[in-house]
Each structure stands twice: as structure tokens, then as C-alpha cells.
């Protein structure tokens, strides 16, 4: 009959089994690394409200138009606008030539036809801004001009942004009148210029 005491071999086998279970394999030096689950980055977007539109002079001027970025990408926005060599504007970019019209870069896939730009026709007063129309290729200004139709003529590298050398038709008004309209933005200034 066998003795009730266990042999040293039984203890060694039990120890090896315990190590196998704990570290994931007999003879392995290190435990298996836990798999890292990466959290997807939230999709950036800027869904503008009327109060998000400010006096042009609270924005950054670039060659006669004004830029801003409410999602923290102003440096990149200004770099693309200043270089005037083309580039895709970052989400959150706001571009305005006059107080009554704006284009805002939305999330990727917002509107592929407009390269994800949303166009705005605005009413401005000393009380602030009201949004009259917003959207894609259907937005028309008070003079009957379709925003997208004009901007679609811009060379592809310019991300639908019109300037004199970008391929768009010239505006029917001169720079002096544009500067006059800009200077009379009736909305209150947030900063002292």
C-alpha cells in the first residue's frame, strides 16, 4: 500500500501547473501583457450657433479676409491662409470676407461635395448675429449668388477657398467697397483693437 505522504515529484508538478496558470505557460519568464484597448478619438466638428460668429476685427486678418478656428487649430488655419499655396483647412476653421457671409469647415464626411464646408448667410447688428441660411450647395446670399457655385471654381488645391488667383470669378465689387463693408461690422468688439 502507498504512503499518504506526497512525493517531491508531485509537489514539483503541482508547482509547475500553478506557474503555468499564473503566467500563461510553463517555462515562460514573463506574464503575458494585457492587450491594450485603444479608445477612438472623438470626431471633431463645429456646429455653429449665431453667438459663435463675432465681429470680423476679433478674428485674424489675412490679405483682406478674416480667419478663426474655434477648435484650437488657429495656428494651422493661419499658416494655410498666409502661405496661399493651398492645403486642407482644419475642422473648426471659419473664413469671412464680409460680416454677412461665412464658411465653416465641418467634420470629414459632413458634405463631400462642398469639401465639408458649411456656408452661412448672416444678418448682423449691434445686438449680434442671426443665421438666415446655412447649408451646402443650396445657400444663396441676398444678391442671389450661390455660395457653392462661386467657390466650386477654386482650383482643387485651395480647398474651395476663393481668392483672386485661385480660379474663381472676380467679385462684382472692388476692394475699396469690401474694406468699407468690413470696417462697418456693427457687432460689438470683444477685444480692443
Image: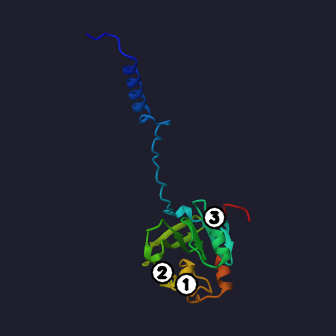
Q: Which residue is mark 3?
A: 74
Q: Residue 72: x, y in percent?
A: 60, 59
Residue 46 seen: yes
**44, 61: nearer the viewer:** 44
The residue positioned 73% from the left and 62% from the top of the image is 192
The residue sitting at the front extreme is 1
**38, 193: nearer the viewer:** 38
* Quadrant in which the N terminus appears: top left
The residue positioned 59% from the left and 89% from the top of the image is 170
Q: Residue 190: x, y in percent?
A: 66, 61
| Disc 2 + disc 3, Cβ < 8 Å | no
Q: Which residue is mark 2?
A: 148
* Quadrant in which the C terminus appears: bottom right
Height in image: 82 above or below 19?
A: below
| Disc 1 + disc 2, Cβ < 8 Å | no
The mark nearer the N terminus, 2 or 3, is 3
The residue positioned 49% from the left and 67% from the top of the image is 106
Q: How is the image coloured?
A: rainbow
Are there few (<14), some (14-19), or many (20+) residues within 10 Å of tag 3? some
**65, 26: nearer the viewer:** 26
Q: How far apart are labels 2 and 3 at the CA level?
A: 24 Å
| Disc 3 + disc 1, Cβ < 8 Å | no
Select label 2 or label 3 by which is in front: 3
Which quadrant holds residue 5?
top left
Residue 186 seen: no
User: Label 1's element?
Assistant: loop
Q: Residue 91: x, y in percent?
A: 54, 65
Q: How far apart are labels 3 and 1 at the CA level?
A: 23 Å
The mark nearer the N terminus, 3 or 1, is 3
Are there few (<14), some (14-19), or many (20+) residues within 10 Å of tag 1? some
- The disc at residue 155 is 1
Amino acid at each position: 500500500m502507498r504512503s499518504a505522504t506526497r512525493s517531491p515529484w508531485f509537489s514539483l508538478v503541482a508547482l509547475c501547473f500553478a506557474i503555468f496558470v499564473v503566467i500563461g505557460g510553463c517555462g515562460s519568464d514573463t506574464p503575458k501583457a494585457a492587450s491594450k484597448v485603444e479608445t477612438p478619438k472623438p470626431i471633431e466638428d463645429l456646429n455653429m450657433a449665431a453667438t459663435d460668429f463675432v465681429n470680423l476685427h476679433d478674428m485674424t486678418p489675412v490679405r483682406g479676409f478674416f480667419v478663426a478656428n474655434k477648435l484650437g487649430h488657429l495656428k494651422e488655419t493661419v499658416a494655410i491662409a498666409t502661405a496661399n499655396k493651398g492645403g486642407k483647412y482644419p475642422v473648426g476653421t471659419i473664413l469671412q470676407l464680409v460680416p454677412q457671409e461665412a464658411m465653416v469647415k465641418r467634420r470629414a464626411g459632413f458634405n463631400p461635395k462642398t469639401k465639408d464646408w458649411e456656408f452661412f448667410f448672416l444678418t448682423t447688428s449691434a445686438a449680434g448675429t442671426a443665421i438666415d441660411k446655412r447649408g451646402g450647395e443650396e445657400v444663396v446670399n441676398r444678391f442671389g449668388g450661390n455660395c457653392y457655385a462661386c467657390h466650386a471654381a477654386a482650383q482643387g488645391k485651395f480647398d474651395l477657398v476663393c481668392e483672386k488667383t485661385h480660379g474663381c470669378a472676380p467679385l462684382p465689387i472692388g476692394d475699396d467697397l469690401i474694406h468699407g463693408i468690413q470696417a462697418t461690422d456693427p457687432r460689438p468688439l470683444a477685444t480692443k483693437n
